[in-house]
Image (cartoon, rainbow, N blue to C red):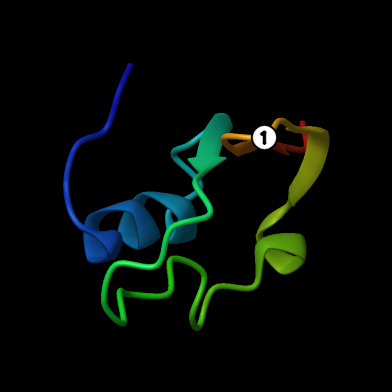
Amino acid sequence: MRIGGSVATIQQYLRARLIDELHLAFRPILMGSGENLFAGVDLAELGYRCTEHASTEFAMHVVLKKDT
């Protein structure tokens, strides 16, 4: 399932531990001040850990998974 929405929406799903796996792709382009996706969210405390990460010249990909 894909979740569409704002940072607040994703944070709510993370805090409720409803996300089993989260794949993020970061581009090295700054567009305004933006919002911090993980502000006030303790991923380790919620049981999430980084299981994969890869960088290319265009993006950095990170996969977070919830511990079972």
Mark 1 residue type: Glu
Residue 8 image point, x, y percent:
25, 66
Residue at 52% in and 69% down: 38
Residue at 31% in and 82% down: 33
26 or 36: nearer the viewer = 26
**Which residue extends farthest front?**
57
Residue 45 image point, x, y percent:
73, 67
- Position of the C terminus by quadrant: top right
> On the rendered structure, is 10 left or right of 17?
left
6 or 26: nearer the viewer = 26
The crowd level at tag 1 (other Cα within 10 Å; few <14, some 14-19, many 20+) is few
Q: Secondary structure at mark 1?
A: loop
68 or 5: nearer the viewer = 5
Residue at 43% in and 74% down: 36
**Which residue extends farthest left?**
5
Which residue position holds label 1?
A: 57
Number of numbered labels in the structure image:
1
> On the rendered structure, is 52 left or right of 6?
right
Residue 21 image point, x, y percent:
58, 29
- Position of the N terminus by quadrant: top left
68 relative to 48, above or below:
above
Residue at 79% in and 47% down: 49
> On the rendered structure, is 42 left or right of 16?
right
21 relative to 28, above or below:
above
> On the rendered structure, is 47 left or right of 11?
right
